Amino acid sequence: MEAREADGSVWRGEARALAPGRTLKFRLMRGGKPIDGFVVNVEGRYHAYVNRCPHAGTALDLWPNEFMTEDGRHLICSTHGAIFEKHTGICVEGPCPGAALDVLAVEVDGTSLVVTWPS
């Protein structure tokens, strides 16, 4: 189950729907514009990012919800092959080392994940 606040600035989803090592896409609104994001479950800890590569500004997933390297150890930009740490969003290999994905705030509220823009 997914839900958004009336203005789209908050996204809620079921934590149990996101198994360890998996990702889930969502959409938030910011300044009246839709922004795609995703959550990754790293061994029971959740991290959320804007779905935009810092190198080229393109979405990371060429195929819907495909954010992981083949071995599942990192996130990858399917356009240019930039490799990012799952728990920090920092690029560790490829065309933009040291650059980072834009981080979104994510917390667990009971059985729900709640994603918002950081303050």
Image (spheres, grey):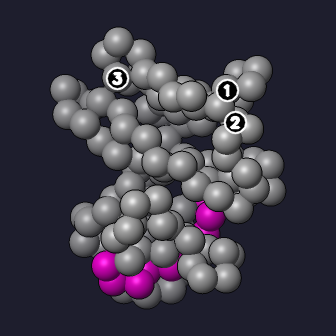
Between 63 and 59, the residue placed more toward the observer is: 63
Q: Position of residue 98 (x, y in %)?
A: 48, 74
Q: Which residue is under mark 1?
A: 112
The mark that comes first in sequence, 2 or 1, is 2
Look at label 1 and name its amino acid.
Ser
Between 23 and 30, the residue placed more toward the observer is: 23
Q: Which residue is under mark 3?
A: 8
Which residue is at a point 70% across and 36% down the rendered structure image? 15
The answer to whether any part of residue 97 appears in the image is: no
Look at label 3 and name its amino acid.
Gly
The answer to whether any part of residue 79 appears in the image is: yes
Q: Is residue 14 left or right of residue 31?
A: right
Could you tell me what secondary structure mostly forms the magenta stretch?
loop
Cα distance between the residues tagged 2 and 3: 19 Å
Query: Answer yes or no: do the residues labelled 2 and 1 have beta carbons within 8 Å?
Result: yes
Q: Position of residue 51 (x, y in %)?
A: 38, 55
Instruction: Write down the quadrant of residue 108 in the picture.
Output: top right
Element at badge 3? loop
Query: Answer yes or no: do the residues labelled 2 and 3 have beta carbons within 8 Å?
Result: no
Up the image or down, 56 lies above or below 16; here it is below
Q: Which mark is residue 98?
A: none
Q: Which mark is residue 15?
A: 2
The verdict on residue 87 being magenta is: yes
Element at badge 2? helix
Cα distance between the residues tagged 2 and 1: 5 Å
Which residue is at a point 60% across and 36% down the rendered structure image? 106
Q: Is residue 94 left or right of residue 108?
A: left
Instruction: Write down the quadrant of residue 52 in the picture.
Output: bottom left
Cα distance between the residues tagged 3 and 1: 16 Å
Q: Position of residue 118 (x, y in %)?
A: 48, 33
Which residue is most to the left?
32
What range of the chain is rendered magenta? 79-88
